Image: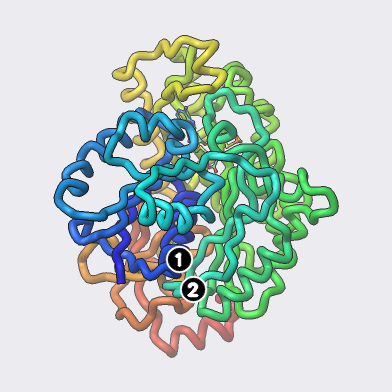
Amino acid sequence: MKKLYLQTHGCQMNQYDSERIAKLMGRMDYESTDCIETADLVLLNTCSVRDRAEQKVYSVLGRWKELKERRDGIIIGVGGCVAQQEGMNLLRRVPHLDLVFGTHNIHKLPEMVEQVQASRSRPVETACYREPSYMEDARGRTNVQGAKAFVTIMQGCNKVCSFCIVPHVRGREVSRPNAKIINEIESLVRQGVREVMLLGQNVNSYGKTSPGEISFAELLGRVNQIDGLQRIRFTTSHPQDLSPELVEAFANLDRLCEHLHLPVQSGVDSVLSRMRRGYTRDEYLARINRLRKRCPHVALSTDIIVGFPGETDAEFADTLEILRQVEYDEIYSFMYSPRPQTVSAKIYDDDTADAAKRIRLQEVQSLQREISLRKNRESIGNIEEILVEGKSRLKNGQMMGRTRTNRIVNFIGDETLVGSLLPVRIIGATANSLIGEELTAEHVSDFRSEGELA
Ligand code: SAH
Ligand code: F3S
């Protein structure tokens, strides 16, 4: 068998794409390896959402030059958002690069690799398609590992956030037909998957651009009926599209986990308007309140951008204020970086110095650490059901799982528990994770009979 080394940058969408790449190449007798030195095919799956993504890609590719010199016949390729954006430029600037595949062309990769092998030509595929079939592969997934799986339900985005490169590199919204999604999840469940994460740039607008397709809330209802599936999650949602039906889904669907990632980006109307987010601070808060009314224990996470063009100290203070008000469970915060082709890069000066952005980022993060720590401590003593995912990142021999609200719980246990749903008692907390202990069999049956566990 030949060997595939695959480096992935960026989001969950890219992780899913990388799994798909590994599966496709697996069918061509490539097995995945962590050792780049022994690989026959070396691929970089890139992300261009933030920072100097292009420079990063060119510097990784620069380091890979010597692989080409050392190993005869090695093939080097680049995919993902930077590939989509740069296309031919990548081949021009990197003579040892063999192929470039864009975000809509993963299905073409096996063919491209064959082309390189046969003729040493240097194929580039960056076309975008409106038909959802580019997201399908001839056969379903193979070799699912673990109890969790990603499932793409749509790609692209029709929103116009002024800072965001995604619509430019992932194209317009395209939804997969619901039957394909259900089939994929049923097959994953047959292979032991207990939890699915439905993926898309803006999953709430699932189906909207496909006449006759069901809505996202309806799709969740159907997924909720799949026998053997225990947990459903999804990401990402745009606040404008958090529909009343979706709020009801959180209230009614037993397998839908009580966690919503709802990026707010900024806490002040002036910045939200420059970002072209399409909602005001009050509208955002009203939606969250409606959701909390119907699903009181829902955990919330968000994305924050600091140092957006023109952001004053007072505007930044309003972002801190919304964090205090909502009390998110978790946030992802970023320093604004102008991205190619985006409106904000074209019409606004990137006028906050990096040093000032860094200070704002630290302020946001330290405030959130306090909030997360306080909220995590409040859960000490609770019994929570976790899905055991594997070894803890703490590298202390512990195992880890996640609560339905997406909290990480580290606990002492053995590896045979991976994939099981386990009730644990929370006995400690940090800002980032909880510490749990397995319940004794006696406790479990006590709690089950007292109805303390779902
Ligand atoms: N809806 C998408 C959003 C993709 S971008 C999704 O599937 O997650 C993820 C986050 O990156 C955004 O919510 C935003 O907070 C951040 N981001 C995007 N463009 C950015 C930029 N130019 N500068 C800084 N942060 C950015
Ligand atoms: Fe980007 Fe806004 Fe869409 S953040 S992915 S343009 S919702």
Instruction: Confirm or reject: label 1 Cβ below 8 Å from ligand 1.
Output: no
Residue positioned 58% across, 23% down in the render = 162
Please name the residue that numbered disc 2 is placed on. Answer: 142
Q: What's the coloring here? A: rainbow
Residue type, mark 1 in image: Lys
Residue positioned 61% across, 37% down in the render = 171
Quadrant for the C terminus in the image? bottom right
Numbered badge on residue 23? 1
Q: Position of residue 353 (x, y in %)?
A: 34, 14
Drawn side of residue 377 relative to residue 396, left or right: right
Residue 427 in sight in this render: no
Residue 250 in sight in this render: yes
Quadrant for residue 438, please give it: bottom left
Q: Position of residue 375 (x, y in %)?
A: 44, 50
Q: Nearer the viewer, residue 140 or 97?
A: 97
Q: Nearer the viewer, residue 117 or 308?
A: 117
